[in-house]
Image: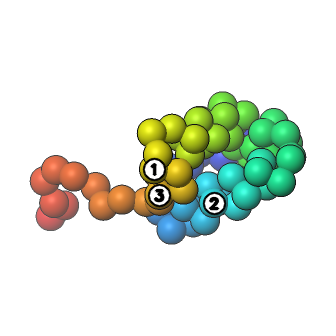
Amino acid sequence: MKRDGRSLAHNILEEMRMLALERMNDGEHPDAVSASFGMHRSWAYKLRAKARGRGRGVRALRSTQATGRPRK
C-alpha cells in the first residue's frame, strides 16, 4: 500500500526527499527509490524534475513554512 505523504511530518518528508535525490544521483532508478519509500513512482520523478529546474537545485526540495492565515 502506498504511503500518504500528508500524514508525515515536514522534517521527515524533507529527509526522504534528500535521500531519494541522493540515491537517484548515484544511479538508482526512480521506480526503485519510490517503491523503497512506499510512495508512488511519480513522487520520485517530480523530485528529480524539481531539483533540476531553474537553478535552485536541492533548495527546491526543502520544507517551507506554510503561507496564509495562521492556525488558531
Q: Secondary structure at mark 2?
A: helix
Q: CA distance from mark 3 to mark 1?
A: 6 Å
Kindly identify the amino acid type of the residue bearing the numbered disc 1: Arg
Q: Position of residue 24 (x, y in %)?
A: 77, 48
**Residue hosting label 2:** 18
Q: Secondary structure at mark 3?
A: helix
Q: Position of residue 44 (x, y in %)?
A: 68, 40
Q: Position of residue 63 (x, y in %)?
A: 43, 60
In the figure, 17 relative to 15: above or below?
A: above
Front position in the image: 20 or 12? 20
Specify the label residue 27 is tagged with. none
Q: CA distance from mark 2 to mark 3?
A: 10 Å
Q: Is residue 36 visible?
A: no
Q: Secondary structure at mark 1?
A: loop
Looking at marks 2 and 3 on the same chain, the residue that comes earlier in the sequence is marked by 2
**Taking 12 as reference, is 21 left or right?**
right
Q: CA distance from mark 1 to mark 2?
A: 14 Å
Query: Farthest top residue?
Result: 42
Q: Position of residue 57 (x, y in %)?
A: 52, 51
**Taking 48 as reference, is 71 left or right?**
left
Kindly identify the amino acid type of the residue bearing the numbered disc 3: Arg
Specify the label residue 59 is tagged with. 3
Q: Which scheme is used to colour this image of the protein?
A: rainbow
> How many marks on residues?
3
Determine whether label 3 and label 1 are within 8 Å by CB.
yes
Front position in the image: 40 or 59? 59
Residue sitting at x 72%, y 34%: 41
Looking at marks 1 and 2 on the same chain, the residue that comes earlier in the sequence is marked by 2
**Residue hosting label 1:** 56
Q: Is residue 25 visible?
A: yes
Looking at the image, is mark 1 or mark 2 nearer the viewer? Answer: 1
